[in-house]
Image (spheres, helix red, strand yellow):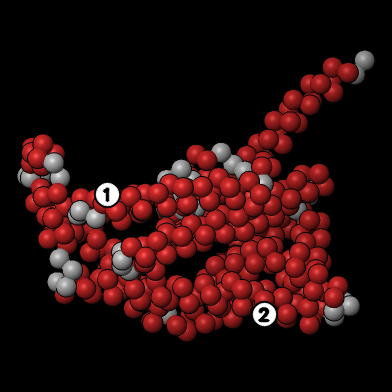
Amino acid sequence: MGTERVGFYVLLVLVTLAFIAVILPFYSAIFWALVFAIIFYPLHMRIERALSGRYNAAAALSVLICLCLVIVPGLIILASLVQQGNELYQRINSGEIDLRQLLTQAQQSLPLFVQERLETLELDGFAEMQERISSVLMRGGSFFAGRALTVGQNTVQFIIAFGIMLYLLFFLFRDGRALARTIRRSMPLSDGHTSKFTAKFTSVVRATVRGNVIIAIIQGAIGGVTFWALGVQPALLWGVVMSFLSLLPAVGAALVWVPTAIYLALAGYWIKAVILVMIGAFGIGLVDNLLRPPLVGKEVKLPDYIVLISTIGGISLIGINGFVLGPLVAALFISAWGIFTEERQGAPARASKQP
């Protein structure tokens, strides 16, 4: 390899890293523009055909549909979530909701032998458990209060990122096919490998967002309406929390409704507890089993333990975007090693056929 070629590759790497550094502050806007473009691209193609190839008008209409169906409702729910979380924190902080009293009532509702067992734990009695639980709930409430303050302080940055996402989404709709061809030609992989990775990328994004998010919204809606009907407040907050937790397989929304049902039972609200358990088990629980196969599809379904670990790891590493990027990285990892294994197994077979 000549000196000029080496110099070109070094320059290519340097300018690529520099470009990544330039766009990194708005990676969330770019990422979600790409996600929305992938999910709504089949609909955009229908709009484009209906408008007889008027690409600009079709792209603008597709962006408007994304705004009305997903983005604006999502922002409204997020704002309501932050508001209710902040109100809950203020009620706890002002003493309107006494967590210690609620925990004491729950303790007194326990059987006597359970109370005696709690007193023997290495926690200096139930009082320390109350203190720890109260501290955790207060930190959760202060998180929502802090989010509300942060949103107010970063309004300009949010507006800029939001504008970039919509602007990029328009061009992804209009020029998506040309961009995809350019990327495929530029990737240092064979055509077969590029096609497999591209298909896996788009299928996982669609399955993760379209399938898992729809399932999460339905489970959260059922849980939120149930909480509202049973008088468990703030119902919207707990419904959204269940939606987020529903992205995790195996455990999911049960992390919210099971402890709530236990508390209702200990507090003496047996009918409410039974209703919540019935709806949680046969309503929220069955949604995943009934809707996941047709929405996600068996061809892109990862093992539940891989989804659980990659989702939690992705969220821990990069925040809310990780619920898509985590399973996406896991799927591409499994796909890459699957291609490698197939080629390793195919190479000896081809060699054995040669005379």
Q: Does 7 sit left or right of 101 as displayed?
A: right
Q: Could you say whether the residue bearing mark 1 is in a helix, strand or loop?
A: helix
Q: Does 218 sit left or right of 338 as displayed?
A: left
Which residue is more in the foreground, 256 or 85?
A: 256
- The image quadrant that residue 57 belongs to is bottom right
Q: How far across and down, in percent of the image, does residue 307 sit?
A: 52, 45
Q: Amino acid at mark 2?
A: Leu
Q: Could you say whether the residue bearing mark 2 is in a helix, strand or loop?
A: helix
Residue 333 visible here: no
In contact (CB < 8 Å): disc 1 and disc 2: no
Tell me if mark 1 has few (under 14), some (14-19) or many (20+) residues whose alpha carbon lies within 10 angstroms of its own: some
145 to 297, vertically: above or below: below
Label for residue 2?
none
Q: CA distance from mark 1 to mark 2?
A: 45 Å
Could you tell me which residue is drawn at 85 percent across and 75 percent down? 50
**Mark 1 or mark 2: which comes first in sequence?**
2
Q: How far across and down, in percent of the image, does residue 248 sit?
A: 47, 49
Residue at the extreme right: 355
Q: Mark 2 sits on what residue?
A: 64
Could you tell me which residue is drawn at 84 percent across and 20 percent down? 351
Q: Mark 1 sits on what residue?
A: 262
Which residue is more in the foreground, 18 or 151?
A: 151
Could you tell me which residue is drawn at 10 percent across and 36 percent down? 113
Which residue is more in the foreground, 55 or 236?
A: 236
Q: Does 227 sit left or right of 159 as displayed?
A: left
Could you tell me which residue is drawn at 88 percent across and 18 percent down? 353
Which residue is more in the foreground, 238 or 8?
A: 238
